[in-house]
Image (cartoon, grey):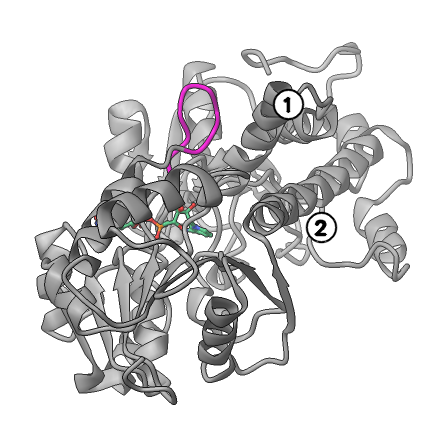
Amino acid sequence: MQVVDKPRLSVIGLGKLGSPMVAVFGAKGFNVIGVDINERFVQTLNEGRAPVTEPQLQEYLERAGQRVRATLDFDDAIAQSDVSFIIVPTPSGADRLFSNRYVVDAIGKIGRALSRKQDYHLVVLTSTVMPGATGGAIQAALERASGRSVGQSLGLCYSPEFIALGSVIHDILNPDLLLIGESDAQAGDLLEAIYAQTVESRPSVHRMNFVNAELCKLSVNTFVTTKISYANMIADMCDHLPGANADVVTRAIGADSRIGLKYLKPAVGYGGPCFPRDNKAFAALGRALGVDCCLAEATDQINDHQIQRLAEAVAASTSPGERVSILGLSYKAQTSVIEESQAITLALLLSKSGYPVTVYDPCANAASSAVLGNTVTVAGSAAEAVGEASAVVIMAPWPQFAEVSWNCGVNRPEQRTVIDPWGIVTSVPGIRLIRPGAGDWRRSVAPADSSAPLRFGSR
Ligand SMILES: NC(=O)c1ccc[n+]([C@@H]2O[C@H](COP(=O)([O-])OP(=O)(O)OC[C@H]3O[C@@H](n4cnc5c(N)ncnc54)[C@H](O)[C@@H]3O)[C@@H](O)[C@H]2O)c1
């Protein structure tokens, strides 16, 4: 190690998580070299601009200033750094398990650069990998390419971040826990010291072997998604129970410290690049090991069912041929990412079922147009989207949606229904407001002779 106090860092992968890591480390006084195979990302970062969209990213890059630079050249980055964080994609394969191919490619290049360097180097894998991967194929690839054995002049850690898009900078700075899977104490000590100079919260630190850390990361995500599906299951129950209200129920049970309120909120299903794939990977791992992981599969089934619930809420108030507007297309507010977004699935389902659909999102209109094509009309504002709609569904709780004038464009307010799974709209006189999980909407608006709700597609 050349500098004990502030080791020089490199971050391999400058995407949605890597770029914020570069910015935060730089802002905290570390010299950081970003590496990517995407020339545009490297050039953008070298011009001092954020390669990806994320709140506070530009601000933190500006705080980092000259301490941050980027390169396409692994040899340069490894020679000029003491610690390398790898944060490249680990996409799900057909078998539902996470693929290591990008990690192995990056680690091969790091290893070859290390074979031309003498000093101690720590490699930290931040990308999410399957249990067994770090100490298996990944360590083997690193040792093969570098000609060194992990443990002496080469440290290896598996240390995933617990972040959500839209609050990545905040989440990196304020973790509840630091998870460090380590090859040896020297590697873990160094990584813990870097985190200690970076985070602003007082996280509990959990150091362990690789496989325990890999299982922890997957288990955190599958547990959180189980809470979301549990809340949505209660909401579904409340839809069918006269007088029941899922908000009242979840607020009370979440007050029990054994349960907790976080993520116990009935709304829409989860989406995005991580949550939907984690239960599938967990269940696939269980199958491979001969372990029954039906809880993970049930969590996903309940999540998929949320599209059906929302489609039924639309059908209970509007007929095919009448326009439905969807506000919020990204999988959550404050991000443009539409991967596995239930809003996109709902738009396609409604369109296929004969509803003209208008969509609007504050920052995901372009990405959504590319996927939805001409099956929907894309509006330039929330007001425009609401304008001619018989029913409006609020799929992501952007704060500005609470300010929309819900009766604009209709002569008689009762001609419009607002479906608000997040509960962000306070009552608007005359407009029919449906809060799935509350308010007896199935009984008050379903046709009297319809005992079976209209079904769309299949689960
Ligand atoms: N995005 C999230 O919400 C999130 C949350 C937690 C964990 N993760 C995990 O973080 C990892 C990265 O996710 P992301 O969302 O930042 O991905 P991303 O696709 O946004 O970015 C990955 C970057 O890595 C670069 N890259 C690919 N191969 C490379 C190589 N061999 N060398 C150098 N750069 C390379 C790509 O060009 C891209 O810029 C994944 O394992 C993911 O599961 C993501």
Q: Position of residue 194 (x, y in %)?
A: 44, 78
- The verdict on residue 445 being magenta is no
Q: Amino acid at mark 2?
A: Lys
Q: Nearer the viewer, mark 1 or mark 2?
A: 1
From the viewer's perspective, is 430 left or right of 12? right
For residue 59, say whether it is visible: yes
State which quarter of the image contains the C terminus.
top right
How far is the residue under mark 1 from the one under mark 2? 33 Å
Q: Residue at x 17, y 52 (%)?
A: 112
Q: Is residue 452 left or right of residue 349?
A: right
Disc 2 residue lies near ligand 1 with CB under 8 A: no
Q: Which residue is mark 1?
A: 289
Residue 308 visible in image: no
> Residue 73 falls in which quadrant of the image?
bottom left
Q: Earlier in the sequence, mark 1 or mark 2?
A: 2
Circle 1: is it few (<14), some (14-19), or many (20+) Cα within 10 Å? few
Point out the stretch of residues depicted in magenta. 90-98
Q: Residue at x 25, y 27 (%)?
A: 373
Task: Name the amino acid, label 1.
Answer: Leu
Residue 188 x, y percent position in the rendering: 51, 68
Where disc 2 sits, the SS reads loop
* Count of marks placed on residues: 2
| Magenta part, dominant SS | loop
Q: Secondary structure at mark 1?
A: helix
In the displayed structure, does residue 252 sit left or right of residue 389? right
Q: Are marks 1 and 2 in contact (CB under 8 Å)?
A: no
15 versus 219 height, above or below: below
**Please, is residue 29 above or below residue 273 in the view?**
below
Q: Is residue 306 above or below residue 210?
A: above
The foreground one among 101 and 264 is 101
